[in-house]
Amino acid sequence: MRPPDEQHAALEFEILAAERELVHGQFARARDHLKTASAMGARKMDVNRLHASINAEEQSHAKRARLSGWGGFGIGGLGYLFLSLQQPVAWTMPLWCGLAFLAIPAIAGYAMGRWQGQGQSPQSRFWSALFSVGWAMCFYTAISLMSLRWQIGLAGQGGAVLVAGTFVSAAYALVAGTVAGVVSAKLAWHGHE
């Protein structure tokens, strides 16, 4: 058996470790430290308080993670709405491509990754950002192509234009979504993990 001072120090270490893991969103690790502290004789009041904090933070984190997809879609949508103020030629193609495929997806992906937190796996952050920003880009591209189709008088043309528009929308969505996913998974918490 440990001397009382060592036992108290080990108990304090487990409580502090549980609190630190809670702050970083590592709920399973926090519960493990709390369980160890409880087995070492931690006060019931401290254990219950910390257990309630872990549960509350875990529920809050789950809600933020669910809503982050809508947040990423909203940021992407606002970015593409700004981009739609002028045709790509008016922006110049390099600037338009940089904004459409790099800047807007990176901003949305970074925000989504931060909202989801460190507790969410990088794979989960990647897929969530890919789908949210990808759909925003898909809608932007489809609407832009439909508008352009009416402007140049291809309104009566059906099949080939539809297939080409669908392909372009999907390809652009995949590129923008992938950029957002990589930023969300790799850069949103870079240096913090």
Image (cartoon, rainbow, N blue to C red):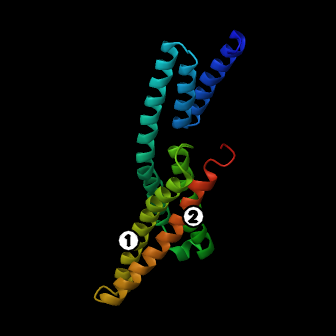
Quadrant in which the C terminus is drawn:
top right
Is 85 placed above or below 74 here? below
Query: In the rendered view, does 83 fall on the left or right side of 189?
Result: left
Q: Of the residues shown, which amino acid type is indicated by label 2? A: Val
Query: In the rendered view, does 179 fall on the left or right side of 10?
Result: left
56 or 95: which is nearer to us? Answer: 56
Q: Quadrant of residue 142?
A: bottom left
Is 156 placed above or below 190 here? below
Q: Residues within 10 Å of mark 2 (few under 14, many from 20)?
A: many
For the view shown, which residue lies furthest in the top direction?
Answer: 4
Disc 1: which residue: 143
Disc 2: which residue: 179
Structural distance between the alpha carbons of marks 1 and 2: 21 Å
Query: In the rendered view, does 31 fall on the left or right side of 167?
Result: right
Q: Of the residues shown, which amino acid type is indicated by label 1? A: Ile
Residue at image coords 53%, 12% = 43
Q: Across the whole image, how many numbered discs are drawn on residues?
A: 2
Is 122 placed above or below 144 here? above
Query: In the rendered view, does 43 fall on the left or right side of 158?
Result: right
Residue 132's disc is: none
Q: Residue 85: where, in percent of width, then height?
A: 47, 65
Is 112 placed above or below 152 here? above
117 or 145: which is nearer to us? Answer: 117
